[in-house]
Image (cartoon, grey):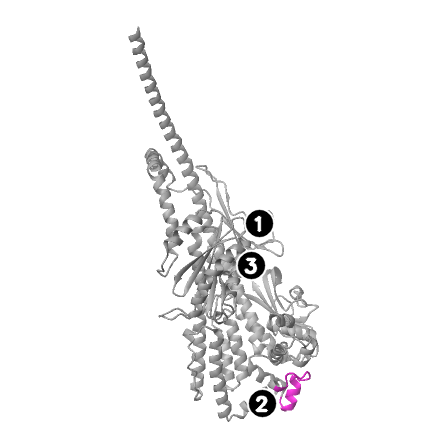
Amino acid sequence: MHFSNKRYDSITDLLKMRNIRRKLIISIYFFILVFAISNFLLFSTFVQKNHIEQLKISNDNLINQIGFSYETVIKNVKTTLYKTTLADTSFTGQVQGYENSFDDKNNVFQELYNIVLASSYIQSAYLYIPAYNQVFSTSNNINKLSSYDKFSDQVVFSKIKEIGHYTLGPRNVENDNSKKQVLSIVSSLPLHAQKNTAFLVMNVDLDRLRYDMLTKFGKTANMRFYVDNMQSANTPLDEANDNFDETLAKSARVLFKNSWSGLKNNDIIVTSVYDSKPLKLTFILETNFGVEVPNNYIKNLSQLLKISVFWLIFSLIAIIFFTIPINRMETKYDEKLWEDFITDDAYFTDDIKKGLADEWIKRGNAKFGMIVLLSSKVSDAIENDAFGNYKTALYNNINSIMEQEDLEMKIITTGKNLTAIAICYANDHSDSACYKQHMKIASMLYEEMDGKSYGEIYLGISTIGDHFNLLPSLYKECVETFEYRLISDSNILYFVDIENRKETYSYPSHFERQILNSLSGGCYESCKSILDDFFLHLMNPDLSIDDNIAKDSIYRLETSILKEINKMSILVEYPIDINISTAQSIENIKTYILKILEEACLKVIKNSKDEKAKLHNEILDYIDKHYTQTDINLNKVADIFNLNRNYISNIINEMTGRNYTDYINYRRIDHAKQILQDERLTVKEVAERAGFDYPSYFIKVFKNIEGITPGEYRSSL
C-alpha cells in the first residue's frame, strides 16, 4: 500500500511537471501570437503615418516655394518703388519742379510708363500731386489725368496723412470693364522728405502673379490654393469669381486631414499653410491625393508575419544579454558627446569629465548654457598677460557667482586662446528665466575684467538647452559668434542676435559711386559722410553678414578708391600701420580709409584748376560754415552765388549724395550731438545752437536720423 501510494505520488508529480511545461509552451505561443498581432498593428500605423508624413512634407515644400516666390516678386517691386522715390533724381526733380504745363504732364506720364515697364508684375502706377489736386494713372481710371475727387481708386491714398509709405493688401480694382486683383505699394516722394511733394503708387498684378506661380509649380485639378489676408476677409486666388468657402479657409490651419486607415480605401487630404510675415498673408494649399496605399504594403506585411517569431526570439535574447551592456554604452556615449565638443585637441582632465558625467547627466530636467571667452591677442609663444590674469581671476569668481545665482558652473580650457564655461541651471526655471540669468552672468564676468582687457577679450553667449547632450551644439553657437566680432559694437556676442539675421546682404555699390564722385571733386566732408553710411550698412543687425564678408566689402571699396586715385594721377602716402585682414576694430579700418580719402581730397583741391570744381567746393564750404544759421535756405545760397536754386540743389546732391534739406539736417544733427554732451543746456538751447527754430522739429529730425530722441542720446552718453 505504501509502495502504491509512493508510485501514485510520482506519477502525479510527473503529470504536474508536464502540465506546467504545456502551460509554458501555450503561454509562449500565445505571447508570440500577441507579439505578431502587435507588430502588425504597429507596422500598419507606422506605414500610414510615414506615408501621410511624406505627402505632407511634399505639400509643405510646394506651398513654401509658392509663398517664397510671392515674397520675392513683391519685395522686388518694393525695392523698385523705394529706389525710385529715394535715388531717382530725374523723377523726383521732375515732380518737385512740376508746374502743370503740357510738357510737365507728358514727362510725368513718360516716367510712370517707364516704371510700369520695369517689371511684368507691375499692373499700373499712380502719381498724386496734392499741390495741384491731380492724380496721374497708367490705368484703372477712365481719364489718365483727373482730380483727386474724381479718381476712381481713392482708397489707395487712404493712409497718406498717417504714414509716409505702406502696403495696401489684396483688393479688386476696375480695369477696362473687368476686375483686377492688385496689391498696392504706396510711398511719399521723395522718400523721408519733411514735406511730401507727391505720392507714388505701384500696383502689383496678383492675377498674373498667381497664374505664373501655379503654372510654374504645376497646379492640378485636385489642388486648391487660397490666400488668407490677415487684415481682411479670406480671398481665394485661384477662382475668377468672389465665391469663397470661408469655413474651409478657417479650418485650413489643421496640418493635415486624413481619413485613410489601414486597408480602408478613403481619400487622403493634406492641407499646408505658409505664413508670410513680410506680406501679412497666409497661403493655404489643399491637395486631395485620392487613395494612395503604398505598393509595398502587402509585401512588407507578409514579410512581417514571417519574421515575427524570429524577431520574438531575438528580442528575448537581446533583452537578456544586452540590457546591461546597453546601459553602459549609453553612459559612455553621453561622456563621449561631452568630450567631443572640445574641438582643439585640448587637455580634458578626468576629474572634470567624471564630475560632469556623475552630476549633470542625471539631471534630466535641468537647463544648460555655455559661455566661451576668446582672447584676440595671443602670441604663438605665450598667452597674453591680460587674458592669463583674467583666467586666473575667473576661478576665484566662479564660486561666488555659483552661490549668488544658485547654479553649477565648470571651467574648461578648450584652446590656447579659448576658455569655455559650462553652466547648469535649476530645473524649476523656464527657458526665458534661465536665459535672463545667462545674460546676467555674462555681464558679471565681463565686468570683472581688467580695464586693459576690454578690447582684447570677447564673450560668446549661447542659447539655453534643455538636455546635457546639447552642450556640444551650445559650444559651437558660442564659437560661431566670434565670426561677427568685427562688425559688433560690443565685446559680448549673443548667438540669438546672429540667429535672427535674415536679410541677404548685397554689396552697396551706390555708396561706392557716391564716394568716388565726391573724391573726384575733392570734397572730404562728403566722402566722410558717405563712408559713415557705408559702415552703418555693414553693421546693420538685420543683415546676414559675418566678418569675412565685411572685410571683402571693405577690400572692394579700398580697391576702387585706390584705382580712382591712380586714375587722377595723385600721389598719396598710404598708412602702413593698418592691415584690414588682421584688424580687430571696424573703427581702425574706417580711420585708415579716411586718412587715404583726406589726403587724396587735399591733393585734388590743391591741384585742381577746374573753376567749376572750385565753385562747388565754395558752395559746400559756405553751407558747412553757416548751416547753424536758422535763416539759411536754398534761395539765399543761390542769391549769394548768383546761380539758379535747382543748379545749387543738384550740386549738393552730386557732392554729398543727399538733397539740400537732408544735408543741412545731417550737419545740424551731427553738431547737436556734440552740444548734447553739455548737460547744462536744455533741448531748446541745443536746438537753437544747431540752427533749428522749433525744438519739436529738432526732436523729430534727430529721431529720424539717429533712431532715438535727443534725450535718449544724452542718456546713452
Specify whether 695 is left or right of 449: right
Q: 610 and 250: which one is in front? A: 610
Using the image, tell me which numbered label, if any, was put on residue 618: 2
The Cα–Cα distance between marks 2 and 1, rounded to whole angstroms, is: 65 Å
Nearer the observer: mark 2 or 3; the answer is 2
Q: Position of residue 274 (x, y in %)?
A: 52, 54
Give the amino acid at mark 3. Lys
Residue farthest top in this picture? 1
Q: Secondary structure at mark 3?
A: loop
Q: Position of residue 110 (x, y in %)?
A: 58, 75
Q: Which residues are magenta?
A: 625-643
Question: Which residue corresponds to mark 1?
Answer: 249
Question: Which residue corresponds to mark 3?
Answer: 277
Q: 144 and 599: which one is in front? A: 599
Is residue 639 covered in magenta?
A: yes
Give the amino acid at mark 1. Ala
The Cα–Cα distance between marks 1 and 3, rounded to whole angstroms, is: 18 Å
Nearer the observer: mark 2 or 1; the answer is 2
Give the amino acid at mark 2. Glu
Q: Secondary structure at mark 1?
A: helix
191 over 238 or under it: above or below: below
Is residue 543 covered in magenta?
A: no
Residue farthest front in this picture? 396
